[in-house]
Image: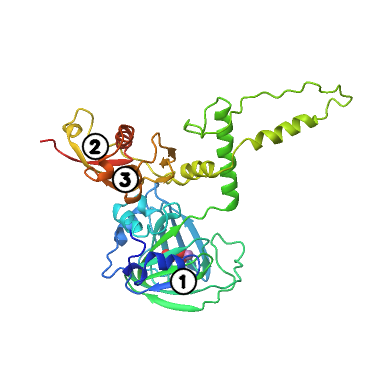
Amino acid sequence: MNPDTPLTLLGGLTPAQFMKTHWQRKPLLVRQAIPGFRPPLSIPAVKKLSRRDDVESRLVWQEQGEWHMERGPFSRLPSPAKPDWTVLVQSVDIHDDGAAALMNRFRFVPDARLDDLMISVATDGGGVGPHFDSYDVFLLQAHGRRRWRFGQQVNLALIEGLSLKILRHFEPEDECVLEPGDMLYLPPQAAHDGIALGECMTISIGFRVPDTASLARGMLEAAADQATARAGGVSGPYGEPPLPGPKLTGLYRDPGQPATAHPAEIPDRLTAAAVQSVAKIRFDEALATRFLGCWLSEPNQLTVFDQPEAQAGDDEEHALPTRWVLDRRTRMLYRGTQLFINGEVACVRAEAGLRQLADDRELAADSPAARKLSPDAADALADWVDAGWIHAIRRRAP
Ligand code: SIN
Ligand code: CO
């Protein structure tokens, strides 16, 4: 996607302009962001997803002014004639190709930040109450109408003792009614409340926001893996190769340790050796890339990859791939020469063809980058096809 091409999806802004002026900063209402929009799933299909135990869903309803929330799966949902309820299905992009394709239209934001596509279905009056999210969100109206009230209030105190996050004081500054194809972008912490006007379906494209403590812990864990590897052990949960760096195989030595009258006291020299040992670990960009690549490329925990249909020995095996396509559930990231796929460090460098596959989520076999793929990359592609992580679209050999 060219960041400088104006998009109807962004009301005529280019992705570059949107990211500069709105992202993380201020709301944007786009009328007819997707003209003639047809949702990837029907309302019955969304309700059917909420019955599955491998799908994350929630039911929210209001009764006599009180908020209630229950987690799925739901063998039965309330009647469509009953007002004031909404069912929300999380990560629809991992369950449906159409939903994944819709989410991919937002890949002007790095994959490392894209989280999931959620769909809510509500009856008249339904909604999840006035709240704020800690991440950016695009709210795309898919069916029916919804009234949004929103603002960037400072007081974000929540009502205590609820299973839902509901603002104690909601002071909206703006209001709009969204029709199918309309979209509202809200930055993190923007207060909002969407109320269904009749039967309503809303699609939310949400983003992931690592908190500082998780980043720090991830770096420390990655450093611990490196220390294990450099001492001759196995690095990381998948035995991935250690990053270049000093060996940590030396043993503590204390010639000249004075005789002690306080044998229970930990010696100065040992505490100093412990402090010096961590100074040998490089908390650098290569380590951050290793940690972030493995972490952020981990597939959704509910993901199960399907084995490819063609079995070894089948005619399919002799057909030539015309292109490779990432499975909708696959996460593939790179930085520099490091390449990551589905939580693992790839056993091959991030060469041009593989970077193109990660960026475009597909690679034509006759493209210049594919023709230059190394034998190692070709082997990796074959392994990922076998794992069901990517699909080889084949043409029969003449
Ligand atoms: C909804 O779809 O009802 C809720 C989405 C949101 O407020 O983030
Ligand atoms: Co929200």
Residue type for callout 3: Leu
**Label number found at residue 326:** 3
**C-alpha separation, residue under disc 2 versus residue under disc 3:** 15 Å
Horizontally, residue 74 falls left or right of residue 151, namely left
- Point out the image quarter for the C terminus: top left
Q: Is residue 127 above or below residue 52?
A: below
The residue depicted at 33 percent of the width and 54 percent of the height is 100
Badge 2 amino acid: Glu
Mark closer to the observer (2, 3): 3
Distance between the Cα atoms at labels 1 and 3? 32 Å
Residue behind label 1 places its C-beta within 8 angstroms of ligand 2: no
Q: Quadrant of residue 78?
A: bottom left
Which of 249/55 is in front? 249
Residue 127 in view in this figure:
no
- In percent of width and height, residue 192 lies at 49, 70
In the displayed structure, 168 sits above or below 348; it is below
Where residue 27 is drawn, which disc sits there?
Answer: 1
Q: Which residue is mark 2?
A: 309
- Hey, what amino acid is under mark 1? Pro
